[in-house]
Amino acid sequence: MPDPFSATRCAHIAVVGAGWWSQGWHLPHLSRNYHAQITAIVEPCEAPRSTLNPDLKTTEELQKLYAVPVFKTFDEFLASPEAEQTDGVIIATTHSAHYEVGMKAIGRFHVLMEKPMTTDLAEADWLAQAASKSDHIFMLNNTANFRDSTEKVHNMVKSKIGQVRSVNCYMAAALLWLFEDPENVGWIKPTGSMQGNGFGLGQMSHALAWLYFVTDLEPEKVCCSMLHSEKTGADITDIAIVHCAGNAIMSIHGTASMPFKSYFESTKHIHMKIFGSGGVLSYGGEDVSLGTDTPMGIRLDTEFQCQDQHPESGGLRLELFDGTDQHLPGFYFENYQAEGDGPESLQVFLSGCGCDA
C-alpha cells in the first residue's frame, strides 16, 4: 500500500457501473488507495444483480459505505458539482454500454475502461479515434499488460527473438457455468451489430491484448471456427488462424471447457509460444507430454498449468539459435487480487490522473 504521508495530491475518480466487478474490486481498491478519492458512483439499478455475486449491495448501501452520491445516469453525473471535481472515470458498465459512456467521457476526463472495449468493431474504432484527439489518457484495464513481467517479455521479443514469424496462443478456463447459464445475458447474447457472444469476446481479449502488446503484431486477415453451447448458443471454443503484417502468422485456441473444481483451483490456463528469427520464447508452462491414464480411462497430459493466481505454476523460457537456454520461474499474468489498493493498471491510471504517486 502507498505511504499515506507521501501522497499530497489525490486523483478524484468516479466509478460508472456498480456491478460485481466494481463492488468486488474497483470500489474497495480506490477506497484503500491513498492516491485516490471516490467522487461519485453511477448505477441505474437500485439493486444491482449478478449471477457471479448474489450478495451485491444496493445503491443506497453503496452511498452510505463510500460516502459519495450515486447517480442513475452518466448525464446526471455530468451535470453535477461532483463532475467538476473529478479527474478520471472508471467505466465498468455492461459491455454494450461502454461506447456511449466512453464517448461522453473522452475529452473531459481521463478514462480507464474495462475489457472488452466494446461489442462493436466500429464503436471501438470511433473510441480510439476520439481518444487519439484528446489530451486526456484513455486506458483499457488489461491488467496483465501493466505488469513488470510483461514488459520483460516485450523487451525480450524485441532484443532476442528478432522478427516474429509465428505465434501459438492457448487459453482455457473452467467457465461453462458462465456461458451455459441463460441468465447471464450480457455474456451469451449478442447486442447491436454482434453476430454472437461468448468466450471469444468475453475471455480471449485477456490473452490477445497481452499477445499483441508483447509482439507488436498487426492482424490483417482472420480465419476462425467456433463451437457453440447447445444450451445458450454462446461460443465456448474458438480456434483461429491470424495472418499479420510482416508475414507472421498466429494460431489461437481458446475454450471454456475446463472442468470446474473451485474458484481458486480453476483459474485460466495460459500458454504462449513466440517463434522468431532469433529463437523461441515460451511464457506459461511447457508441456512435457507425460501422459497418464486415470481409473476412468481418460488420458491426462501432465504440464505446468499456467494460472494467473498461481505464479509458481509456470514461468518464462528463452531458447535461442546461439545456444542460449534461459529459464525464469514465476508466471505473472493478470492481477486479480481483491485485497490491497489495486493492480498495476490502476496505479498507472491514478498517476496519469495527476496524483502524486
Image (spheres, helix red, strand yellow):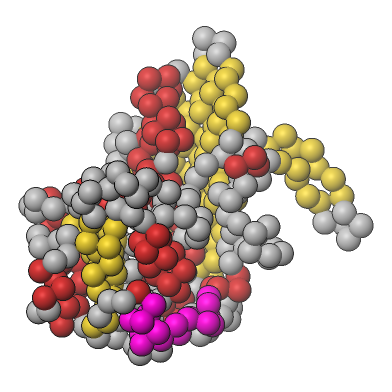
Residue displayed at 49% across by 21% down:
279
* Residue occupying the far top of the picture: 322
Q: Residue 205 location in percent, x, y? A: 41, 56
Residue displayed at 57% across by 20% down:
326
Bounds of the magenta segment: 49-65
Taking depth in this image into account, of 61 and 184 the one nearest to the observer is 61
Residue 287 vs residue 247: left or right? right
Q: Which quadrant would residue 197 be assigned to in this image?
A: bottom left
Residue 14 vs residue 76: left or right? right
Residue displayed at 81% across by 51% down:
299
Taking depth in this image into account, of 113 and 217 the one nearest to the observer is 113
- Tell whether position 56 is magenta: yes
Residue displayed at 14% across by 66% down:
85
Q: Which quadrant would residue 126 be assigned to in this image?
A: bottom left
Q: Residue 331 location in percent, x, y? A: 56, 39
Taking depth in this image into account, of 211 and 142 the one nearest to the observer is 142
Q: Which quadrant would residue 73 be assigned to in this image?
A: bottom left
* Residue occupying the far front of the picture: 5
Residue 314 vs residue 113: left or right? right
- Tell whether position 276 is magenta: no
Q: How many marks?
A: 0
Q: Is residue 288 in view from this perspective?
A: yes
Q: Is residue 215 above or below residue 23?
A: above
